[in-house]
Image: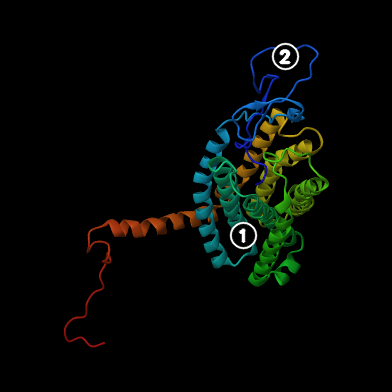
């Protein structure tokens, strides 16, 4: 699972003669000048054994989970509110895409669909089911397979936003080429390529190190995977966002100075909002991961533990904010959402009425008089 909340509940504290602030110790003073000895249980577990065979290098204790049940409550609320909202957004965008056949609506629909998959796979399966309910008591192969799906969903969400950015850049900066090249088929093929690439780039993360379960120091493979994740899921997309958004804003200002009315202001505002939210909310996760990799491990420093928990919660918040942004910017989207809600409410209202009511039209057509010919 992606680095989630709280330590592994399967970890049990070792019983040692040296009683520290976060250890379970035996009562009694330690003789002066004598090396601390770890007491290991015998195979049958009935007593503690002493002697040379009982010497064991003490491993550093895991950092405590200082956030408690807050992540569980947070992710439950995020899933309970964000998933229905994203489903509503997907239906509204699907209607707009079918009606207008604009590539931007198709990209926004694909972005919403990837956010839904992210909420189901990462928030529900990863953080809630595997992390909180099952306590990571799952086979290693199952957990690592879940890693592949989680990272694939994450990469799909990010790179669909990159597609949307490139499409807006071509529409505003190269409008003639965009009109000649854009088509619904080309848009669907581009989305399919990105989704396939996201699934392929998620496969190497089968060997992702679980910092809550594995106390070993990160190996070269772990370092490569963490850098690959930070580059493909944050630094490279943010670089694309910065370059293309700067060109878009420059083009809009140039048109404004020339007395031309800027086109696509609402689409540009949505684009800038989506990319800015992503850059701000995913920044803590990327930098905390690199800090954990080179400076302090999570399982020994509670501050890094806390920072990673908060960073993960901030990153997942990005999947539930797009609906508010669309509603705030676009009146067309608000109308489409209202139509979806009205259409869903109308059958329920008709079904709740007594039989014979609601089925008849308000105005009946006038019948023909007897003897009248058509």
The residue lying toward the viewer, choosing from 7 and 103, is 7
Query: Which quadrant of the structure image shows residue 22?
Result: top right
| Disc 1: CA contacts within 10 A as few (<14), some (14-19) or many (>=20) | many
- Foreground: disc 1 or disc 2: 2
Q: At numbered mark 2, what does the secondary structure look like: helix, strand or loop?
A: loop
Between discs 1 and 2, the one toward the N terminus: 2
> Where 102 falls versus 60 (above or below)?
below
Query: Which quadrant of the structure image shows residue 353?
Result: bottom left
Gap in angstroms between the C-alphas marked 1 and 2: 64 Å
Q: Which residue is mark 1?
A: 110
How is this picture coloured? rainbow
The residue lying toward the viewer, choosing from 24 and 329, is 24
Answer left or right for 202 relative to 347: right
Answer left or right for 176 relative to 124: right
Total marks drawn? 2
Question: Which residue is at the far left?
Answer: 370
Q: Position of residue 256 (x, y in %)?
A: 73, 51
- Can residue 225 be seen here? The reply is yes
Q: Position of residue 1 (x, y in %)?
A: 65, 47
| Disc 2: CA contacts within 10 A as few (<14), some (14-19) or many (>=20) | some
Confirm or deny contact between disc 1 and disc 2 (CB under 8 A).
no
Q: Position of residue 194 (x, y in %)?
A: 70, 62
Q: Which residue is mark 2?
A: 30
Query: Which quadrant of the structure image shows residue 65?
Result: top right
> Where 190 falls versus 333 (above or below)?
below
Image quarter hosting the C terminus = bottom left
Q: Position of residue 263 (x, y in %)?
A: 67, 57
> Where 355 falls versus 44 (above or below)?
below
Answer left or right for 56 relative to 109: right
């Amino acid at each position: 699972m992606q680095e989630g909340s709280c330590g592994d509940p399967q970890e049990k504290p070792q019983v040692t003669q040296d009683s520290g602030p976060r250890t379970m110790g035996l009562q009694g003073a330690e003789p002066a000048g004598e090396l601390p000895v770890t007491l290991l249980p015998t195979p049958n577990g009935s007593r503690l054994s002493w002697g040379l065979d009982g010497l064991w290098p003490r491993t550093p204790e895991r950092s405590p989970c200082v956030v408690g049940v807050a992540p569980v409550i947070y992710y439950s609320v995020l899933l309970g509110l964000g998933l229905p909202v994203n489903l509503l957004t997907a239906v509204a965008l699907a209607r707009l895409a079918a009606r207008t056949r604009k590539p931007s609506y198709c990209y926004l629909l694909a972005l919403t669909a990837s956010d839904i998959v992210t909420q189901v796979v990462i928030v529900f399966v990863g953080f809630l089911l595997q992390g909180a309910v099952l306590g990571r008591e799952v086979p290693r192969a199952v957990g690592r397979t879940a890693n592949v799906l989680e990272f694939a969903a994450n990469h799909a969400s990010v790179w669909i936003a990159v597609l949307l950015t490139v499409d807006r850049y071509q529409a505003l900066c190269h409008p003639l080429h965009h009109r000649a090249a854009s088509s619904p088929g080309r848009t669907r093929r581009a989305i399919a390529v990105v989704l396939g690439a996201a699934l392929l780039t998620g496969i190497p993360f089968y060997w992702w190190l679980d910092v809550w379960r594995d106390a070993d120091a990160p190996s070269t493979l772990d370092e490569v995977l963490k850098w690959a994740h930070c580059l493909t899921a944050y630094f490279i997309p943010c670089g694309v966002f910065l370059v293309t958004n700067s060109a878009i804003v420059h083009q809009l200002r140039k048109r404004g100075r020339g007395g031309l009315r800027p086109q696509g202001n609402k689409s540009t505002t949505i684009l800038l909002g989506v990319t800015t939210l992503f850059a701000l909310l995913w920044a803590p996760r990327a930098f905390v991961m690199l800090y954990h990799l080179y400076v302090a491990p999570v399982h020994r420093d509670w501050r890094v533990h806390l920072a990673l928990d908060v960073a993960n919660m901030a990153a997942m918040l990005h999947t539930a904010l797009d609906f508010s942004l669309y509603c705030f910017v676009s009146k067309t989207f608000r109308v489409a959402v209202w139509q979806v809600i009205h259409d869903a409410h109308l059958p329920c209202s008709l079904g709740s009425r007594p039989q014979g009511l609601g089925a008849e039209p308000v105005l009946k057509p006038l019948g023909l008089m007897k003897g009248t010919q058509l």
